[in-house]
Image: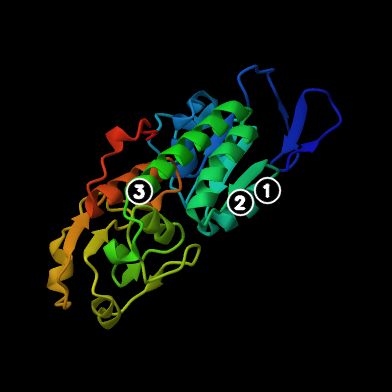
Amino acid sequence: MDESDGSAGSRTHRGGTPRHDTPRSDGPRVVSLAPSATATLSAMGAGEVVVGVTDHCSLDRPSVGGWLTPDYDRLAALDPDLVVTCDDLQASIRDELRDQGFEVVHTEPTTLSEVVESFAELGETVGRSEAGRRLADDCRDRLGAVREAVPDDPAERPTVYCEEWSDPPMAAGNWVPEAVETAGGRYPFCESGERSREVTAEEVSGADPDHVVLHVCGHGESTDPETVSARGWDLDAEVHVLHDDLLNQPSPALIDGVERLAGLFSAFDPQFTGADSAK
């Protein structure tokens, strides 16, 4: 965390160099190193507090480099009050930033419920408490509408395999099991909150999925659906490709992803839920 040097309106970071703040009425200066946080702040209407992002973020702001390879000097030049990181893969970056004296907020949601709650927490952190709560409440309403619309009877629920990485094939974990169940499917590969894991052809074939959903990390929606048949797996399933943001990113896009899944598994149509997309 930033350390006070005893003088009004200044802080010390990066080896003791004083940093003098200009009073601001619009919230802290935020550098977001997490594409999910960038998307969430934009969705709650707080994009103006973001002064820096990564190459992988969608907001048009100065980039400090890659998600896992930020340039600390470029970051410091943006004079942030707060840096946001996410995921255990950024834990070492979080620690390095704190060692350099930066104020860092780090989140690691692992379930769908935790993802939605993190929207409100992020809003509070950047001084947009009401906007964050409103976004979280809207997302809960949308998820509730999906749950009301999809089949309740387990016998009517299709079995689903979601793949977040293809070499080797990995069944998606974390919030994806809960997303599939919310959307009306059965997901026998991981429990909610468990990490993604490598799977074998025998495991997937043995589960006899009705749907295979490819959302390969970093590939957008460019994954070839023939990837599955080329493996020679013994499957009789519909194969779908979703943009990886819809299931891999703990942002409001994940709610869009749940609605998309529900549309694939049943006749669910999000336009009839009365909730607008927050993507």
Q: Residue 94 carries which label?
A: 2
Q: Name the residue under label 1.
A: 98
| Vertical relation: 254 (above or below) 198 | above
Front residue of this view, candidates 151 and 193:
151
Pick whichever of labels 2 and 3 is earlier in the sequence.
2
Question: Left or right: 258 with respect to 45?
Answer: left
Counting the numbered discs, the total is: 3
User: What residue is shown at x 64% (from left), y 35% (from top)?
Assistant: 125
Q: Name the amino acid, label 1.
A: Arg
Front residue of this view, candidates 22 and 169:
169
Task: For the residues labelled 1 and 2, say whether their Cβ atoms are less than 8 Å apart.
Answer: yes
Pick whichever of labels 1 and 3 is earlier in the sequence.
1
Question: Left or right: 44 with respect to 206?
Answer: right
Q: Name the amino acid, label 3.
A: Val
Question: Left or right: 144 with respect to 220?
Answer: right
For residue 64, say whether it is visible. no
Q: Mark 3 points at which residue?
A: 258
Packing grade of label 2 (10 A; few <14, some 14-19, many >=20) is: many
User: Which element carries disc 2, helix, strand or loop?
Assistant: helix
User: What residue is shown at x 39% (from left), y 41% (from top)?
Assistant: 145
| Vertical relation: 81 (above or below) 37 | above
User: Which element carries disc 1, helix, strand or loop?
Assistant: helix
| Vertical relation: 177 (above or below) 67 | below
User: What residue is shown at x 23% (from left), y 63% (from top)?
Assistant: 212
